Amino acid sequence: MKYLKTFFIAAAVLIMGCLFFACLLCSLMQDSPWCAWWPHLSAAESMEFVKSWVYWGVLASIGMMILHSFIPFPAEFTAIANGVIFGPVWGAVITWAGAMLGAFLAFLLARRLGQPFVRRVLSKR
């Protein structure tokens, strides 16, 4: 029962990752009828779209970097997009903050789930 909270956190991260990859797949298959809901935006329209979110754009970018700690996808794309959208200084700050939060959460998850696993696998000697 004490691992239930950790399980729900891991499940939420997995669901967010699946949603991210579904969006990524739909952006690659723009002409597919399955992805008709995905907006067909140019690079300039995409930048304006993210800028219109104001603070939600920053939180989404930090969320992408946190997600990168759990699901392997290139963080360079997010970092470059942050630099282009928010400027080089704020883009670097946002990217760094997201990466550090992701590393911290990955450490906590590994510490919570890893210690019982190691204790079970290793002998008491």
Image (cartoon, helix red, strand yellow):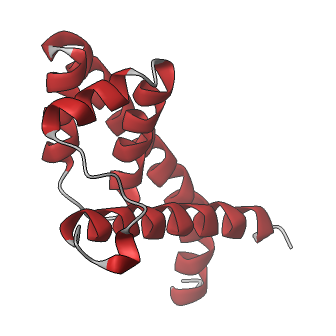
Q: Nearer the viewer, residue 85 or 96?
A: 85
Q: Look at 36% across and 62% down and name the residue there.
A: 23
Q: Look at 16% across and 30% down and name the residue there.
A: 44
Q: Quadrant of residue 42?
A: top left
Q: Residue 25, how many percent across, how many down?
A: 28, 71
Q: Residue 103, how many percent across, how many down?
A: 39, 45
Q: Is residue 43 above or below residue 36?
A: above
Res. 123 in view: no
Q: Residue 55, how many percent across, how many down?
A: 48, 19
Viewed as shown, does residue 64 lie left or right of 16? left
Res. 113 in view: yes
* Quadrant assignment for the C terminus: bottom right
Q: Residue 101, how many percent across, how many down?
A: 44, 36
Q: Nearer the viewer, residue 38 or 11?
A: 38
Q: Quadrant of residue 9?
A: bottom right
* Quadrant assignment for the N terminus: bottom right
Q: Nearer the viewer, residue 48 or 31?
A: 31
Q: Quadrant of residue 13?
A: bottom right
Viewed as shown, does residue 96 lie left or right of 122? left
